[in-house]
Image: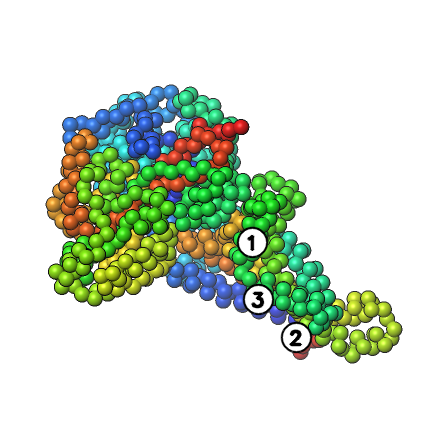
Amino acid sequence: MRRFLLRRLALALVTLFLLSIIVFLLAQVLPGDVARRILGPFADQRAVTALNKELGADRPLVVRYGTWVGGFVQGDLGESASTRQPVWEVIKPALFNSAKLAALAFVLVVPLGILGGVIAALREGRLTDRLISIGGLSATATPEFVWAVVVILVLALWLKILPVTAAFPAGSGPLVQIRYLLLPAICLVFVLFGYIARMARAGTIEALGADYTRTAILKGLSQRKVLTHHVLRNSLLPTIAVIATQAGYLIGGLVVLEVIFNYQGIGQVVFRAAEQKDFPLLQSAVLLVGLVYLLATLAADILYSILNPRIRLQGES
Amino acid sequence: MQAGAIDPVTVNFEAGLTVLGQSGEYLAWSDKNLELQPRIAESWKPNGDASVWTFKIRQGVKFHDGTPLTAEDVAASINLHADPDNGSNALSVFGPVLKKGAAQATDDQTVKVELEAPNGNFPYLVSSDNYNLIILPKTYDGDWEKTFIGTGPWKLDKYTPEVSVTYTKNPDYWDTSRQPIADTSEITFYAEEPAKVLGLQGGEVDIINNFSVVGGKALLTDPTILVLEVESSAHRQIHMRTDMPPFNDKRVRQAMALLIDRDALVAGLWEDKASLGNDSPLAPVFPSTDTSVEQRVLDVAQAKQLLADAGAENIEVELRLWDGFEMPDLAAVIKNQAQAADISVQLNVTDAGTYYGDAVFGKSPWLDSSFGITEYGHRGVPNVLLDAPLTSKGVWNSAHFKNKTYDGLVADYVAALDLQTQKKTSSKIQELLLDEVPIIFAYFYFHLGATKENVTGVEKTGMGHIDLTKTGFTG
């Protein structure tokens, strides 16, 4: 197990290093000059030159990369070029906000998705199955901004039961925060339900037809016991992998929802940083989102190997 | 409002200027009628040729930290922006007008500013129109976001970058008639327009300082919303390179301008929240504009005749622009209307960064393309709009228009001290540009804001400033 973990960690570090180079180079190919982007096209050229010098944007590429990576590994993410705040001070609350929204979405969608999938599997081929499968797939195929418009119109503007924004007032308690986060979380439930339910359904159908399930039934165990002790434990393995990989998406990929609901998450930070060519902020934010993806995948691998020793043994051999 | 770093030196976006104008204050306030209201300056006067301006500074004004404001603070604030090493956004206005150290406090109450050339509109250049120029303490050395230091009617309570700023009223504000009615106010920043519009409709905010017709059409017909509109000089410039085919022949440029149905644009793109442009930056809102100059209107037959006279047939040209505001819609209309005279327009729509490039000649589609659309914000006086995009040495001259008569007229206009002289010169400028058409000015759109129906006393300007001192609620 230890070797397996070390190998995974080493791979994650190599991926992170490669990611840092890709992120850095991609950020450089964004069109336009850094200071020009911050000061605008109509700013005097002397002002642009002065700001580029101040930001260090006039230094060679390799020097800038070295400074950034050197700072990053020591925990110094530098200063945002556009807001002049320390990058960590911008990213930290945004990551925390994204994590809150992701957690709420998870709490809602994971049980719903698994329940939906298992019910669909138990009613395979019947109307309930069709409703859950086709309904879930349709919801997933609908872009998140469409869901955002629908839920805002219905729940916020017509029925007026939820706030139109996710930006809860400063100092709000947990319940108020949840109330503000419900609308985007509902959109995410629509988007993710189909994925999770589909995996849970497939896994459950496979487990229901397996020899060990037949043996358990023939042993005379109750249907509930067969389901919880034998079917679910085996059927949920692929579902867990799907859920874990969605964690990265939920924390780093919600740009559109965050913009529509005016929520200061990491997705919006990345979007704004890219727009403004704010390299220090963009690079660190993308790298941290990459780190979240890696950790989520790593967690999925570990969980998977705990639940399924065959994977662990393969890894060790 | 969309936010970024709120720094008086570098702010170049509307949310930033709105914030600057709450706790900060200018020498004068350029109101919605483009008239200057004295604020930190009690009065001002030029010398004989308007190359030196003297400002009498108000006494008894205090910064939020209790320090009295002096003439030295005023001179230091002007010099801060005039010094190229400080990289001020205000240099785009000050660049050809002021040199580093041009402002001097001659005594406790007087600041004298020596200009590089006569300028009859100079007080506008140090007013709220040049929005970076809030008066700061002479000891100011950056980090404005920590204090929001100024002399204005609102004091900083709490600022969360990119999220919001809350204010309390300044009990020591010098102008008792402008003491805020409300005890506190809060500004929320929105990254994108749809969220802002929804925020107002959903009751999250009571006022939005601006919205576009494209993005906020729902507000125009919402009975619970009051729309605030201020006529402005904001516009789009459709430039045509005068030094290369197909637009190096002015008849082709005139033909292109005649093919554009301005009435349809104002009605279709702006729901009539705009006034007609007449191919010069002298918008109807400027008091010096000669509104008797004949308006160019759609005339396909004349356009075809001009093209035939020029021997220009089956013209193919690329129109460059970036994907913002109503500009892609405007480009689509131009493409369609040009077809009436067999001009084939290919659209090349990119992001803003690509379009502006490095924003210098040779490295910018904006400045190098033969045909392009560029957005220009409001100005309280037309000086910059007459100069930078159109004079021979203009740094934004995307049309590459070089005309000595025009350059001379602009110099005359800038130096003119009284409205009558300005009007006379304006008339000549308008006639010249109407004939030469280096740039098509199809419309000048209004600055729109909106409030809930129970909100009163919000004053807006064409620049985007918002005065909340008289704001309250009915009922």
Give the SS element for disc 1: helix
The residue where tag 2 is placed is A315
Name the mark nearer the viewer: 1 or 3: 1
Quadrant into which the N terminus of chain A falls: bottom right
Q: CA distance from mark 3 to mark 2?
A: 15 Å
Q: Amino acid at mark 3?
A: Ala
Question: Of marks 2 and 1, which one's residue comes earlier in the chain?
Answer: 1
In the rendered image, which quarter is residue A126 located in? bottom right
Task: Please indicate whether residue A238 sits to the left or right of residue A68 in the image.
Answer: right
What amino acid is labelled 2 in the image? Gly
Residue identified by numbered label 3: A12
In depth, the one of A203 and A46 nearer the eye is: A203
Give whichever of discs 1 and 3 has the lower sequence position. 3
Is B140 placed above or below A27 here?
above
Residues at marks 2 and 1, CA–CA distance in whole angstroms? 46 Å
A274 and B1: which one is in front?
Answer: B1
